[in-house]
Image (cartoon, rainbow, N blue to C red):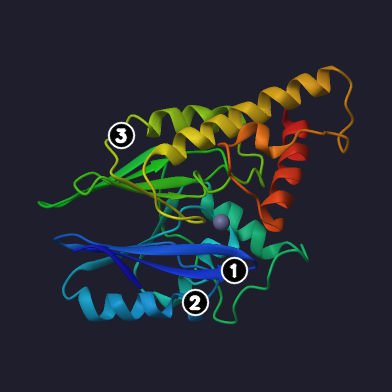
Amino acid sequence: MEQLTDAVWVHEIVAEGFSTVCAVALTGSRAFVVDTLAGPADVEPVAALVRERAGERRVVVVNTHHHWDHVYGNAAFPGVDLVAQRACPRLLEAQLASADESLPLPPSAGVPLPNVTFGDRLTYVDEDEAVHLIGTPGHSEDSLVVFLAGAGILFGGDTVEWPLPNFSQRGGLEPWVTNLRRLKQLPLRLVVPSHGPAMDKHIIDANERYVAGVREAVTEAKRAGAARHELDLAAARFLDAGVELDEVYAGVHRANLVWAWDEV
Ligand SMILES: [Zn+2]
């Protein structure tokens, strides 16, 4: 576990080639866990920290969206509030029922579904901190971010990602860009994406440029007659100068072009 402030920790694993983090934030009366990684064993150090530090606090586990690498460890926190955006339980159930062989098998402990849901925003207020869960559809229909207003820290889920975001589900590129523009208005000291290093709010600008840029370029290419798998749009065009992609993210970019072609 890496400690970011007096009351905030993050824990990182590598899941199928992607660095993936989850977080713990303690407020006066609550212990928030943001995402549960790819299984109960992955998230055990986080559960241990909560057991050690939470004391009388109420434990609140937040799923930033339904994808396996953010929810498969839910069973490590029995009997607590599992909070997510309203669309999450349905999407998670569908994911668990699907025979998609590209997805890892769920853990034998099962994956408890969220039992507290909201639409656009849910806020928990303590004397020392206000924690806002904000719905940000884009990466997926049920994506959300967690904003600690006092600390100025944003846990971005997959709404922000470095070196580039993953379109992966048709949550909608247009609402995604709108949400990134909204997030930039928040007073942020630190942005912690689920995949990628913690950094300042520049990551939001960079992701906005990528999502809006790919959407626009693919729209133009499609209009000009380009076929679905013939899109020749180098990632560098949409990224900061000098950003190098490893094989995993080069593949994400190629898949993003196809997702975008289907949507525009
Ligand atoms: Zn993810």
SS state under label 2: helix
Q: Nearer the viewer, residue 195 or 168?
A: 195
Q: Measuring 27% from the left and 80% from the top, which residue is drawn there? A: 51
- Give percent across and percent down for residue 99: 77, 65
Q: Amino acid at mark 3?
A: Leu
Query: How would you rate the neighbour count of disc 2 (Cα within 10 Å): few for under 14, some for 14-19, many for 20 or more?
Result: many
User: In what quadrant of the picture does the N terminus appear?
Assistant: bottom left
Residue that carries the numbered disc 2 in the rendered image: 42
Disc 1 to disc 2: CB gap under 8 Å: yes
- Is residue 104 shown left or right of residue 142? right
Query: How would you rate the neighbour count of disc 3 (Cα within 10 Å): few for under 14, some for 14-19, many for 20 or more?
Result: some
Disc 1 to disc 3: CB gap under 8 Å: no
Residue 92, relative to residue 122: is it above or below?
below
- Is residue 54 shown left or right of residue 250? left
- Is residue 194 shown left or right of residue 47? right
Q: Measuring 48% from the left and 56% from the top, which residue is drawn there? A: 194
Query: Label 3 CB, ligand 1: below 8 Å?
Result: no
- Give percent across and percent down for residue 141: 56, 42
SS state under label 1: strand
Q: Which mark is residue 186?
A: 3
Query: Label 1 CB, ligand 1: below 8 Å?
Result: yes
Residue that carries the numbered disc 1 in the rendered image: 15
